[in-house]
Amino acid sequence: MRDMISKAVSLGLGLAVAGKEQAEKLVDELVKRGEMSREESFAFVDDLLKKGEDAQRRVSDLVQERVQAFGDRTWATKEDIERLEQRIDMLIARLDAQHDLSAADPAGGKAEDADQP
């Protein structure tokens, strides 16, 4: 039972949420059941609290790291996207115009050369 509780706390569950009072209630129950002595209970509560604090610190460090990484990125603004969309539209129009010219002149623009000897 103690092992299961320790693992839960190590994963950031239990004391990270429940706090010292909940841990003491849990340990008191274990002492009442005879699963641990009063002396063991004090050490056990201290150990659980330390593990809970360590888990909170690791989570906090991880969140700070992710926020920092997120903030370091360069993101496109709405104006950047609109400007790119306008450029794409312009390029599509140019390609369409070139395609229309090629379709209108099947000789590929060499009609003048065909009449000359």
Image (tube, grey):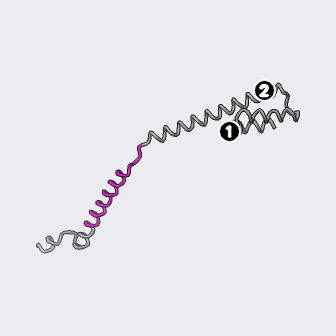
Q: Is residue 73 above or below residue 46?
A: below
Residue found at the very far left of the displayed protein? 117
Q: Position of residue 17 (x, y in %)?
A: 68, 39
- The label on residue 17 is 1
**Quadrant placement of the N terminus:** top right
* N-terminal-most mark, 1 or 2: 1
Looking at the image, which residue sits at the far top? 39
In terms of depth relative to the viewer, which is nearer, 115 or 72? 72
Q: Amino acid at mark 2?
A: Phe
Which span of residues is magenta-colored? Answer: 74-97
Task: Report the Cα–Cα distance between label 1 and label 2.
Answer: 20 Å
Q: Is residue 40 left or right of residue 89?
A: right
Task: Give the side of residue 5 with respect to residue 64, left or right.
Answer: right
The residue at the point 27 percent across, 68 percent down is 99
Q: Amino acid at mark 1?
A: Val
Q: How far across and how far down the image is residue 68, in percent? A: 49, 37
Q: Position of residue 83 (x, y in %)?
A: 32, 54
Q: Position of residue 42 (x, y in %)?
A: 78, 26
Q: Residue at x 52, y 39 (%)?
A: 66
Badge 1 vs badge 2, beta-carbon distance below 8 Å: no
Instruction: Identify the residue under disc 2.
Output: 42
Image quarter of residue 86:
bottom left
Which quarter of the figure has residue 29?
top right
Q: Which one is nearer the viewer's eye here, 113 or 16? A: 16
